[in-house]
Amino acid sequence: MGDPSLSSSGDRGGGEVHYHYRALRVSGVCARLPPLLQHREAGVRAKVCSLLGNVSKHGDAFYAHMLAAGLLPLLVDGCADADGATRKLACFAVGNAGFHSAVLWVRVRVRVRSGLGLGLGLGLGIGLG
């Protein structure tokens, strides 16, 4: 089954332990992502949003790193990107991050309400809390 000491509470998803999450956290990858979320190539921005959405899918293992790297405001900005794939994947990442942590959701909600103008939750029967 593996060494449970390699796992944190945020490393479990679907009953499986994600040992690679620990390696990603230790690598400091989050600190390297802000420039990539602002890259001129839409495909690069979309892939980074996908990565962040996927590592946020099963828990809060990366949240402190995401906050420290300043990724949340960039992800929220990605929800209004000119590229459709980037918009979709940024929304996926923001949704996953907000789902697992009230701390992150409060930060995202404030950013969305402060003028991004995405129309999230407006006229769709979805409240922003």
Image (cartoon, rainbow, N blue to C red):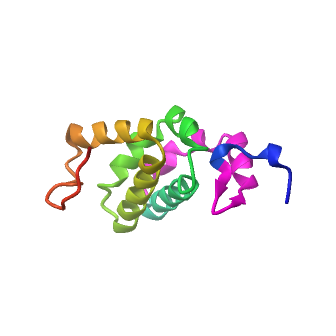
Q: Residue at x 55, y 57 (%)?
A: 51
Residue located farthest toward the front when viewing the structure as drawn = 15
Tell whether position 68 is magenta: no
Camera-side residue of 50 and 10: 10
Point out the stretch of residues depicted in magenta: 11-40
Q: Position of residue 100 (x, y in %)?
A: 48, 47
Q: Position of residue 75 (x, y in %)?
A: 41, 48
Residue located farthest toward the top when viewing the structure as drawn = 68
Where's the C terminus, which quadrant? top left
The prevailing secondary structure element of the residues shown in magenta is helix
Camera-side residue of 35 and 85: 85
Residue located farthest toward the left when viewing the structure as drawn = 123
Q: Position of residue 54 (x, y in %)?
A: 55, 59
Up-down relation of residue 76 to residue 14 (above or below)? above
In screen coordinates, is 33 left or right of 91?
right
Where's the N terminus, which quadrant? bottom right
Q: Position of residue 57 (x, y in %)?
A: 53, 57
Q: Residue at x 70, y 43 (%)?
A: 8
Number of disc labels:
0
Up-down relation of residue 112 to residue 45 (above or below)? above
Q: Residue at x 72, y 40 (%)?
A: 26
Where, by quadrant of the figure, is residue 64 drawn? top right
Tell whether position 25 is magenta: yes
Where, by quadrant of the figure, is residue 55 drawn? bottom right
Q: Residue at x 23, y 45 (%)?
A: 116
In screen coordinates, is 14 left or right of 109?
right
